Amino acid sequence: MSLKPEDIYTHENSMKWELNESMPDFVARPLVLEIVKKYSSKDKSLLDVGCGTGRWTKKMAVDYESVVGIDSVKAMIDISKKLNPSDNITYSLVDMFELRALNKTFDVITALSVIQYSVDNVQLAGLIKQIFDSLNTGGHFVFWVPHPMLIMMNTSNWEKCKFEEGSSYFSNFPFTGKVRLTNGDWKNIGANFHSIQEYLNTLVNAGFKLVSFNEPSISKEFVEKYPDMEPDSRYPSFLVVDVVKE
C-alpha cells in the first residue's frame, strides 16, 4: 500500500505545519532558499511543487517575477491562499504527477520534501521527466528529501518512522511516523522510501546535470537549543540537490 499526501494531511494536520516549525525549517529549507536566491531575477519564474501551506513558497517568491505553488491537498491550498498570499504567487490544486496539465515552463522548479511520495522508481522517473520537460533550458530543479539513512536507521530524536520488518534499502516501501515540532508536539507524516542511487540515477537518466549535492545535518545552534538532539548531529538528516537542464 502506497501513501499519498492527502492520506496524511488533514486540515488540522496542515495547520500544524503553518503554526509550528520542525527541524527542516532550520536546515533543509533554508539551504534550498539560499540556492534558489542565486538564480532569482525579476524576469524569472518559479514553480513550487507540493507548496504545502505556502510559507516557504512566499519566502522564495520575493525575487521572482511570477511564482506558481501547487499541491494535491485542498486543505494546504486553502491555507496558502488565506495566510500566505502575494501579488506574484498563484496557488493551484494540482497533482504533482500531472505537471503537464499546467502547460507552462519555468526557470526554477522546487520541491521541498515532496518527491518521496512517488510510489516506486517508475513513478519517480515519470515525475522527474515531467519536471525536466517543465523547465526552460538552463533552468534549475532544487529539492530536498529526508535522508534515506535517517529513515533506515530510525534512531532520530525528531523523526520516528514505521515500516514493515524486512524492508530493504534497495526496494521501495511505504513508511509512516511522526516528526517533532519545536513546540514539543508530534505531527503525523508518511511517504515512500527511495535510495540515494535511485534519486541520482533518475535525475541523470532524465537529462539533468548535477550542480550540487548536500547532506546537511542539524546545526550547533540547534543542538544548543535542543540538547537531546545532539545524537542527530552525527549523521545527515537530509538530501538537498540542485540540478540543471542544459
Image (cartoon, helix red, strand yellow):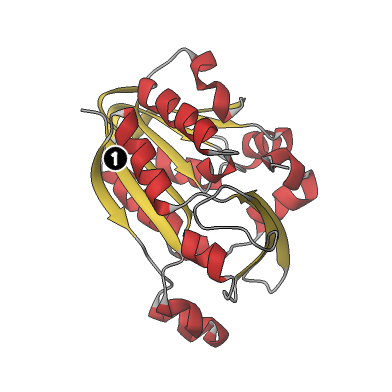
Q: Quadrant of the C terminus?
A: top left
Amino acid bearing label 1: Val
Looking at the image, which is closer to me, 208 or 240? 208
Where is residue 226 drawn, in percent x and y? 54, 82
Give the quarter of the image for residue 198.
top left
- Residue 92 point in image, percent of width and height: 60, 25
Q: Which residue is mark 1?
A: 243
The residue that appears at 28% across and 29% down in the rendered structure is: 207
Q: Residue at x 64, y 42 (%)?
A: 83
- Number of residues whose C-alpha sits closer than 10 Å to that of mark 1, classed few (under 14), some (14–19) or many (20 or more): many
Between 44 and 73, the residue placed more toward the observer is 73
Name the element at disc 1: strand
> Can residue 88 be seen by looking at this rendering?
no
Q: Position of residue 160 (x, y in %)?
A: 65, 68
Give the quarter of the figure containing the N terminus: top right
Residue 121 shows up from this direction: yes
Q: Residue at x 38, y 19 (%)?
A: 105
In the image, residue 61 lies at what x, y percent? 42, 38
Query: Which residue is at the front of the view, 182 or 170?
Result: 170
Taking the view exactly as shown, the residue that stands out farthest to the front is 166
On the rendered structure, is 152 left or right of 185?
A: left
Viewer-proximal residue among 41 and 23: 23
Answer left or right for 137 relative to 31. left
Q: Using the image, determine if residue 103 lies above or below residue 99.
A: above
Q: Image quadrant of residue 236?
A: bottom left
**Total labels drawn:** 1
- Residue at 56% over, 51% down: 193
62 to 214, vertically: above or below: above
